[in-house]
Image (spheres, rainbow, N blue to C red):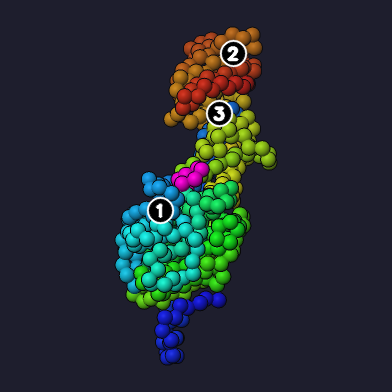
Amino acid sequence: MSFILNIRLIRNKVRRFQLHFLLLLLLFNIPAILVSQVTIDPPSATIFPGVPVTLTAEYGMLAEPVNSSQPGNDWVEGPYLIGFDFYFFGNRYTDFYVGANGFVSFSSSDRTANARDAFTIPSHPNDNLKPRICIFGSFCDLDPTGSGSPHIYYRKIGSSPNCKLVIIWCQTPMSWCQSEMVTFQIVLYETSNIIETNIRQKPECLQSNNNKATIGLQDAYQSLAISPTGRNASSWTVLSGSSEAYRFLPIDRTANNYTYVSFSSPMEPIIPKDKIEYLWYENSSSDPFNKDPLVPMVVVAPQVTTDYRVETTICSEKLAPENVRVTVVDPAPNAFIPNSSVIENRTFRITGLPVESITEYKLEIYNRWGQQVFYTDNIMDSWDGSTNNNGIDLCPSDVYVWVIYYLDNGTNVTNKGTVTLIR
């Protein structure tokens, strides 16, 4: 069910029909939600036994931190560029301000810096201690300057006319319950002027204004507002692993009327620095093998085909795991016939190596008595079955041992195997 903020009584049935029709248009023209997911580069790999390959997990885009040099933890910082024209309660804005306690404002008024306890909206126009022209994401007494700061980040994503501005409070400590963390996003949409609040975690903190918090919108005159049922200076919680999100829809660009609907969506993929962790696992193991979860890449060198998966946590929220298979193949044929009618079978050569990353390559071949019968430092060379390819000293049919040495992007690699010479 959606609720319409009615500033004036709408008595005309035609007007009501127009409002609902506009709402349907807005709902069906919302830009596609960008699904948060991790990708692995490369998505698959084929290597020789023991050849190293680097797997990199990629998620989102690095966001800008909001820092403050102001005393205390009830500050407001800005202005920051929205990156597009945004209409809020009928007025156009190009800048925004960030309130430490969970709101975005389009006003630089100093009075907003003193606001810490959730209050009922709309607040009284003469109350100079309440912020105005605001979007309340999860407004309560927070401490974004606490341990692990910064905790607030922002970034514009997408391309015009469908850009989005995303502001995130990531694992932000609650002022009166420092061990409890709040995570939520506020998202502004270009063109449609839609606003989203996406709460991923809001624990209970009775010491902070009896756990009261506010979600909603308030205009410049503190006389118009909209808030979801039960979220207007009320006591509520969102447990870790769940979510609560609302989409606020303007009836039109210049109107003061909004509606809201509940929705469900992952967080928008912006990355707060040092607030994202990657755990890598091999096959079905439950023990991660990487030592530093803040580093998104690992180097693996399996001897047999192996499946790897990465489990990613951002702002305490676990994302769906992603998987990659590294296929291991034999690095060389196991037999060749110098007089074969098939040209490809007349010589022995190491094939399939990633030539572009190989340096200091060496190939050595030995007979059963340990005598070297062939050597090359050219990765493109092949053995024709004679001693050092002289074409005169033909080696007899037998099993020979080959060994390769090389540097792969600076990593020393050694590998060996056998090949049967058939005459």
Q: Is residue 205 magenta?
A: no
Residue 180 sits above or below residue 117 on the image: above
Residue 287 quadrant = top right
Residue that mark 1 sits on: 75
Image position, residue 81 (x, y; %): 32, 55
Q: Secondary structure at mark 1?
A: loop
How far apart in space, not on screen, are marks 3 and 1 (Cα)?
53 Å
Which portion, as a residue range, is magenta?
145-155
Image position, residue 123 (x, y; %): 44, 71
In terms of secondary structure, what is the magenta stretch mainly? Answer: loop
Residue that mark 3 sits on: 51
Q: Secondary structure at mark 2?
A: strand
Q: Is residue 367 visible?
A: yes
Q: Is residue 152 magenta?
A: yes
Residue that mark 2 sits on: 366
Q: Is residue 383 visible?
A: no
Image position, residue 319 (x, y; %): 57, 50
Question: Residue, x 34% and y 75% (percent of image)?
Answer: 254
Image position, residue 422 (x, y; %): 62, 21
Question: Residue, x 59% and y 39% (percent of image)?
Answer: 280
Q: Nearer the viewer, residue 298 or 72?
A: 72
Question: Residue, x 51% and y 10% (percent of image)?
Answer: 392
Identify which amino acid the numbered label 2 is placed on. Answer: Tyr
Eye-nearest disc, 3 or 2: 3
Identify which amino acid the numbered label 3 is placed on. Answer: Val
> Within 10 Å of the Cα at label 1, are there few (<14), some (14-19), or many (20+) other Cα atoms?
many
The N terminus: image quadrant: bottom right
How far apart in space, not on screen, are marks 2 and 1 (Cα)?
74 Å
Residue 219 quadrant = bottom left
Q: Nearer the viewer, residue 51 or 243?
A: 243
Identify which amino acid the numbered label 1 is placed on. Answer: Trp
Question: Residue, x 43% and y 86% (percent of image)?
Answer: 9
